[in-house]
């Protein structure tokens, strides 16, 4: 029960931090820097919801809010255990947020060069680092026995699979002379060639499943040690 109470605190932090960062994003509030350089590279207003970073954090916050409600009911004895679907949603949320953190560190930082620090300033500090880390910690150390099987770990790709459909349709709907336009291939995954989608999409889904498996294994190892 102590672990559940800690989980409530962590879920509350996730929800509040995403709510705060989203508010700052929508209204263009810069809390760490006011320079034009930072503002130029920091997503602002509702259009930022086109980015997987924002979507994965928003989804993670919604899952955290649902968790808070169910965990409070668990602590009060109103339910015997959390339903499996909640654990699956948590896995999907944690996977999406971990993917966001890794893409930022391994893919975006090299693109930003000397401006890499902008990826961790203002709302990006929460979206790219703080919330993903909290989500990983919560799932691995405080989720408890999830009852999730190896086959169930595929559920972890749901956010990326959904986003891939949206992203691909958007790119194909706005081709310029048969080539992806940078304004619509905003992550640059296709590199100006539509044929790269055949490689990029399966690769991203495979990487996402790998992350889901890593989180699933981490959770199982922690719980096996305690049993």
Image (tube, rainbow, N blue to C red):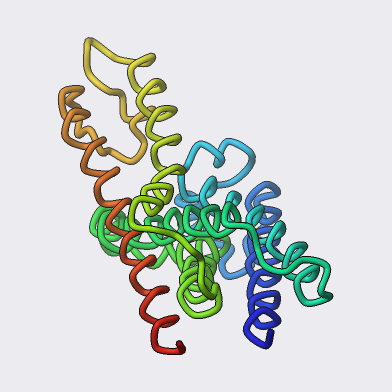
**Frontmost residue, 96 versus 107:** 96
Quarter residue 172 falls in: top left
**Frontmost residue, 35 versus 13:** 13
Q: Position of residue 155 (x, y in %)?
A: 43, 47
35 sits to left or right of 15 = left
Against 81, is 203 above or below?
above
Q: Position of residue 92 (x, y in %)?
A: 47, 53
60 sits to left or right of 207 = right
**Frontmost residue, 163 versus 148:** 148
164 sits to left or right of 144 = left
Q: Position of residue 210 (x, y in %)?
A: 27, 57
Is the C terminus in the top left, top right, bottom left or bottom right quadrant? bottom left
Q: Residue at x 21, y 43 (%)?
A: 203
Q: Residue at x 23, y 37 (%)?
A: 202
Q: Residue at x 38, y 67 (%)?
A: 215
Q: Position of residue 99 (x, y in %)?
A: 37, 56
Q: Residue at x 70, y 74 (%)?
A: 8
Is the N terminus in the top left, top right, bottom left or bottom right quadrant? bottom right
Against 205, is 139 above or below?
below
**Frontmost residue, 19 versus 116:** 19
Instruction: Identify the residue at the far top of this view.
Output: 177
Against 201, is 81 above or below?
below
Quarter residue 149 falls in: bottom left
Quarter residue 83 falls in: bottom right
In this rendering, the count of numbered labels is 0
């Amino acid at each position: 029960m102590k672990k559940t109470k800690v989980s409530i605190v962590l879920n509350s932090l996730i929800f509040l931090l995403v709510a705060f960062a989203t508010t700052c994003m929508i209204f263009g509030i810069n809390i760490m820097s006011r320079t034009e350089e930072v503002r130029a590279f920091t997503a602002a207003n509702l259009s930022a919801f086109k980015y997987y970073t924002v979507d994965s954090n928003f989804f993670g916050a919604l899952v955290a809010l649902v968790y808070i409600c169910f965990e409070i009911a668990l602590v009060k004895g109103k339910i015997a255990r959390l339903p499996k679907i909640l654990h699956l949603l948590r896995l999907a949320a944690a996977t999406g947020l971990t993917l966001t953190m890794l893409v930022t560190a391994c893919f975006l930082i090299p693109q930003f060069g000397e401006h890499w620090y902008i990826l961790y300033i203002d709302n990006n500090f929460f979206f790219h680092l703080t919330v993903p880390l909290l989500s990983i910690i919560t799932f691995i150390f405080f989720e408890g026995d999830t009852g999730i099987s190896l086959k169930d770990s595929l559920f972890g790709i749901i956010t990326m699979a959904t986003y891939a459909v949206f992203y691909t349709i958007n790119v194909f709907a706005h081709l310029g002379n048969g080539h992806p336009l940078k304004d619509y291939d905003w992550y640059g995954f296709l590199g100006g060639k539509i044929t790269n989608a055949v490689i990029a999409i399966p690769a991203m889904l495979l990487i996402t499943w790998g992350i889901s498996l890593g989180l699933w294994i981490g959770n199982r190892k922690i719980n096996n040690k305690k049993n």
